[in-house]
Image (tube, rainbow, N blue to C red):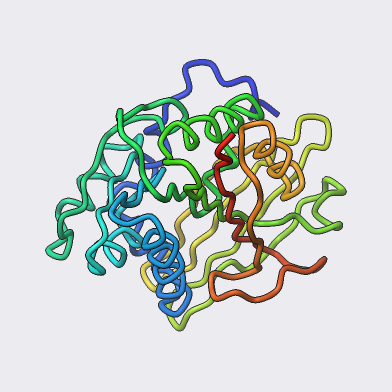
Amino acid sequence: MGAIFLAGYDAADYGTKVGGDYDGLYPGVPDETAAAVRKIAELAMEHAPAGVLEFGIGTGRLAFGVDQRGIRVVGIDGSEEMIEQLRSKPDNGTVETVVGDYRDTTLGERFGVVVLAFNGIMDPRGIRAQLDIFTNAARHLIPTGYFIVESWVMNDAQRRGDWSIVPRFVGNEHVELQLSRYDLATNGIDRTLVHLLPDGIKFLTVADVYTSPEALDVMAEVSGFDRVSRHATWGGAPFTATSANHITVYQLRTN
């Protein structure tokens, strides 16, 4: 599996693959999106008017909701295609965007909250890049600012290394199946995302490097963060041994 040793890695690759289909393929769950916006805005207001920086802003699903609450939002994304989709929307508000790799792109200013949602922490370049992301988040936060990470959690069956099939989204006219296989030796994950739609089937293949919640806690510790909370959903459901996702809030230490 070549997930870790990526020659010529291109931060724009995912956006190029998905292109203008992203919002159709990933419409999101309205209640969960609303809960995410509420949580981000709540934490941002503790440090008003410092604002929010979103790593991997994509087409703006979270950013627009936060912006509409009167909170400044800046986003970094490696894909010009994704940024173009964001800018083309009539409700893009005052959201600011920068094209770049959020592993190391620096803006020269600090925010109250940095957000990395939708499994973005599972950078295919591996643990060094994932640590760099924590460092870059710290670089962009004011003292006691928050870094929010959303990601999925592998279960015991998936850790065995066999192919697993999980329904990620089920709607009336859209079903997404995730086929994934984990390599214990490298922490790499091969994933094929199969979208069943009225007009046909669409495939997207991606490679990630898995990082568990406990591994993220170690990265946070060495990067100057303390963990504040961890929940299974943006709405605050308890995180348990059977949770398939987590939303973790880290706070930058002052010393």
Which residue is nearer to you in this view: 45 or 1?
Answer: 45
Q: What residue appears at the point 44 percent right and 61 percent down from the top-left corner? A: 43
- Residue 91: percent from the left, percent from the top? 16, 65
Against 10, residue 47 (above or below) is: below
Query: In this view, which residue lies farthest toward the front?
Result: 255
Instruction: Tell me the quadrant of the picture where the C terminus can be found.
Output: top right
Which residue is nearer to you in this view: 201 or 25?
Answer: 25
- Residue 115: percent from the left, percent from the top? 45, 50
Count of picture labels: 0
Q: Is residue 211 left or right of residue 198?
A: right
- Residue 87: percent from the left, percent from the top? 17, 51
Against 107, residue 164 (above or below) is: below
Q: What residue appears at the point 40 percent right and 75 percent down from the top-left corner? A: 34
Q: Is residue 137 left or right of residue 21?
A: right
- Residue 131: percent from the left, percent from the top? 61, 30
Q: What residue appears at the point 25 percent right and 54 percent down from the top-left corner? A: 72
Q: Is residue 202 left or right of residue 254?
A: left
Quarter holding residue 11: top left
Q: What residue appears at the point 22 percent right and 51 percent down from the top-left corner? A: 85
Which residue is nearer to you in this view: 122 or 135?
Answer: 135
Q: Is residue 80 left or right of residue 166?
A: left
Instruction: Tell me the quadrant of the picture where the N terminus can be found.
Output: top right
Query: In this view, which residue lies farthest toward the bottom?
Result: 172
